[in-house]
Image (spheres, coloured by chain):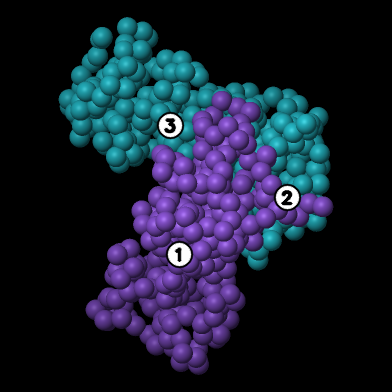
Chain colours: A purple, B cyan
Amino acid sequence: MTIKSISSRDNPLYKELKHLAASSQARRKAGRTLLDGVHLCEAYLEKVGLPPLCIVGETAMLNGEVIVIVQQCSGTATQCIVLPDALFHALSQVEHGVDLLFVIDTPDLPTPPRLTQSAVLLDKVQDPGNFGSIVRSAAAAGIKQVFCSAGTTFAWSPKVMRAGMGAHFLLEIFEGVDLSDLLGRSDIPVIATSSHAEKQLYELDLRQPVAWLFGHEGQGVTDDLLARATHRISIPHLGDIESLNVAASSAVCFFEQVRQQTSR
Amino acid sequence: MTIKSISSRDNPLYKELKHLAASSQARRKAGRTLLDGVHLCEAYLEKVGLPPLCIVGETAMLNGEVIVIVQQCSGTATQCIVLPDALFHALSQVEHGVDLLFVIDTPDLPTPPRLTQSAVLLDKVQDPGNFGSIVRSAAAAGIKQVFCSAGTTFAWSPKVMRAGMGAHFLLEIFEGVDLSDLLGRSDIPVIATSSHAEKQLYELDLRQPVAWLFGHEGQGVTDDLLARATHRISIPHLGDIESLNVAASSAVCFFEQVRQQTSR
């Protein structure tokens, strides 16, 4: 194994990593992000391939799962680096995890010209945990494309990726998309959820591809986008609650589609 | 309106409030917690009644919605207190909200002897956002009882209540419950989710009351509790994802029950 050891906080590569870890803007600019922990790194190796950089804390070099991962990376184009635990911890937001990080290039995919397969459209979803949970549910439901408006939280932040649990590596994620424009270029029905809609989720025929549109946690889908959707639906409630959390509501929608698609 | 103004950080009541705001242990010990913001306070007034204390930031006293709430509270057993904005902000975890807080007594309900109506059983669910989203979905699905094991996050923390969006006030929440023991005292089927279960959610007849059992975010439902459940089910996946987020998975289950209960 060829593993480089860095022990100084002033090392230029370490300083670059710290900048990436601390600043969402730096991650966007560099087109790189950090994957935290064994689970995400294993998922990346399995679904995508080798990362440009693999960073390990000194103590974690004794961990069996980490050793396997480092062995997979070393001797390849991947640069493996060991850091003293204190230096590693300054890079990671995970408190009680195994000290392993991949630095990966974030995909920058050109938006497809038309909506042709089941997809999720996210307009200004703010919370990284919600975003991660939504893509995790979408991937589990067999959906392959996610389109995000400009005001949506960054898809590749470490927090979103931890919540996504590897779903990112199964999906095509398009960011900064003009959703209003995209809705005019759809070959499939676009379904928007709204607590005020009269039509209910369970009235829809979902055995065909559809695009699901979800909005901001507080304000929901904007009136403009609602008007452009093919269907506006609500999830029927039996209790006196105004709305569901957006990640919960998307899971209900995606799996109603799975239920219809898998039932005889 | 009789409103007391506090301007000193050394005021004994203010010090008590700060302690409540900062320490989960203090909240548990006092049997009191803080409700943050207009939405939660309105929900409390509507569903429960008047709080013992209503706290407002100076600037928020000019807000129309806040004025209505303070008027409802004043002249009653509720003590209304105005704080300089800086003192208020030291009590609240909300960054861009309207400066309004209720201090409320947390219910301490005796656990019912038997499970007889649709319920949620939470074993060691850790994340406040997940817990809040689960109770929000449960209340929307018409479920009325929530039973939490000793290792589950505190149901009445400000973070859980923000995520619950008022669902707490529609539910009976029992904490520190011995779930293993409770499963022996159930008059209704207990359904546990497990990604390894062969039986699928959609094979169940849910037109009767059932108890839903969910476990820790990482480890899932313990083997002991799984073995004691009436049914072990999985949610079918069409994509290569191991599991859903626990709040997403609970929403899928609750609303499959709603679908079956509301369909002819």
Which residue in the protein does label 2 denote? A260
- Could you say which is closer to the camera, residue B149 or residue B155? B155
User: Which kind of residue does numbered mark 1 sit on?
Assistant: Phe
Q: Residue at x 47, y 18 (%)?
A: B46
Secondary structure category for the residue under label 1: strand
Chain letter for mark 1, please: A
* N-term mark: 2 or 1: 1
- Which mark is drawn over residue B27? 3
Q: Residue at x 61, y 31 (%)?
A: A237
Secondary structure category for the residue under label 2: helix
User: Could you give the CA–CA distance between mark 3 and mark 1, rounded to whole angstroms?
Assistant: 44 Å
Q: Residue at x 34, y 18 (%)?
A: B69
- Could you say which is closer to the camera, residue A42 or residue B8? A42
Q: Is residue A106 left or right of residue A42?
A: left
Question: In the displayed structure, would residue B122 be above or below residue A57?
Answer: above
User: Which kind of residue does numbered mark 3 sit on?
Assistant: Arg
Residue B154: x and y in percent read: 51, 37
Q: Residue at x 23, y 15 (%)?
A: B4
Q: Are marks 2 and 3 in contact (CB under 8 Å)?
A: no
Residue A20: x and y in percent read: 33, 70
- Could you say which is closer to the camera, residue A9 or residue A45? A45
- Which mark is drawn over residue A174? 1
Q: Nearer the viewer, mark 3 or mark 1?
A: 1
